Image (cartoon, grey):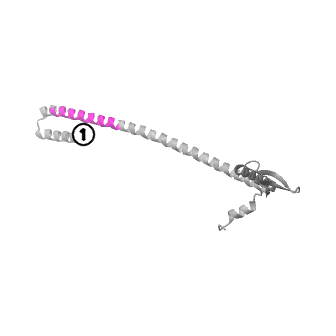
């Protein structure tokens, strides 16, 4: 761009110098040729600069388009991830509500306690050491017993919902 301005300045100075000399015939022809040459050089420079600018704009447009597509893909992935997290949270809330509903009824709460007890006994003790639904002295039934030598240890499974609720709502560790 500086070259174009310099050429323009030279052209103006040349025109002024020729006008001051006063030799109009020969000077006019030389001036026309010089002006034509300077104008063509000026025009060529402008076309060259314009072409370079156009190429830079096209490269910038392609780069911006590429980045925009990547950004849109990233936002889309984030949206899907957020949607999955929300769905998982809703499922967890439904599961929590279901568990709360199950534990409201005493019979279901008892069944749940028995199932947890049996699962724990199966994982900890070998088969044959414990039994489920055992009748003690022919009159009272317990959920399970553990037999050790001649000793029978009765276990009655209860899910302590009220105690557990008090534990959760307690303000101190005690």
Relative depth, front residue between 173 and 15: 173
State left or right for residue 10 relative to residue 146. Answer: left
Crowd class of label 1 (few under 14; some 14 to 19; many from 20; radius 10 Å): some
Residue displayed at 72% across by 61% down: 164
Residue carrying label 1: 4
Number of marks in the rendered image: 1
Relative depth, front residue between 24 and 164: 164
Which image quadrant for residue 8?
A: top left
- Image coordinates of residue 45 in percent, x first then y, are 27, 36
- Image coordinates of residue 141 in percent, x first then y, are 84, 55
Residue displayed at 67% across by 48% down: 91
Q: Is residue 43 magenta?
A: yes
Q: Which residue reaches farthest right?
A: 139
- Image coordinates of residue 35 in percent, x first then y, are 20, 34
- Image coordinates of residue 90 in percent, x first then y, are 66, 49
In the rendered image, the quadrant that contains the N terminus is top left
What is the span of residues highlighted in magenta in the rendered image? 30-53
Q: Where 158 sits versus 82, above or below?
A: below
In the rendered image, the quadrant that contains the C terminus is bottom right
Residue displayed at 73% across by 63% down: 163
Which image quadrant for residue 62?
A: top left
Relative depth, front residue between 153 and 163: 153
Q: Is residue 32 magenta?
A: yes
Per the picture, the main secondary structure of the magenta-coloured stretch is: helix
Residue 98 appears in the figure: no
Relative depth, front residue between 67 and 150: 150
Residue 123 appears in the figure: yes
């Amino acid at each position: 761009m500086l070259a174009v301005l310099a050429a323009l300045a030279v052209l103006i100075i040349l025109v002024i110098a020729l006008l001051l000399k006063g030799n109009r015939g020969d000077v006019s022809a030389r001036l026309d040729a010089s002006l034509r040459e300077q104008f063509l050089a000026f025009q060529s420079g402008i076309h060259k600069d314009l072409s370079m600018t156009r190429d830079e704009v096209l490269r910038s447009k392609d780069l911006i388009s590429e980045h925009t597509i990547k950004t849109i893909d990233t936002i889309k992935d984030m949206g899907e991830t957020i949607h999955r997290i929300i769905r998982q949270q809703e499922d967890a809330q439904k599961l929590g509500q279901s568990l709360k509903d199950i534990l409201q009824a005493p019979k279901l709460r008892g069944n749940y306690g028995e199932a947890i007890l049996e699962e724990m006994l199966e994982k900890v003790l070998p088969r044959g050491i414990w039994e489920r639904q055992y009748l003690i002295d022919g009159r009272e039934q317990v959920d399970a017993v553990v037999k050790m030598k001649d000793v029978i240890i009765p276990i009655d499974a209860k899910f302590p919902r009220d105690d557990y609720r008090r534990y959760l709502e307690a303000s101190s560790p005690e």
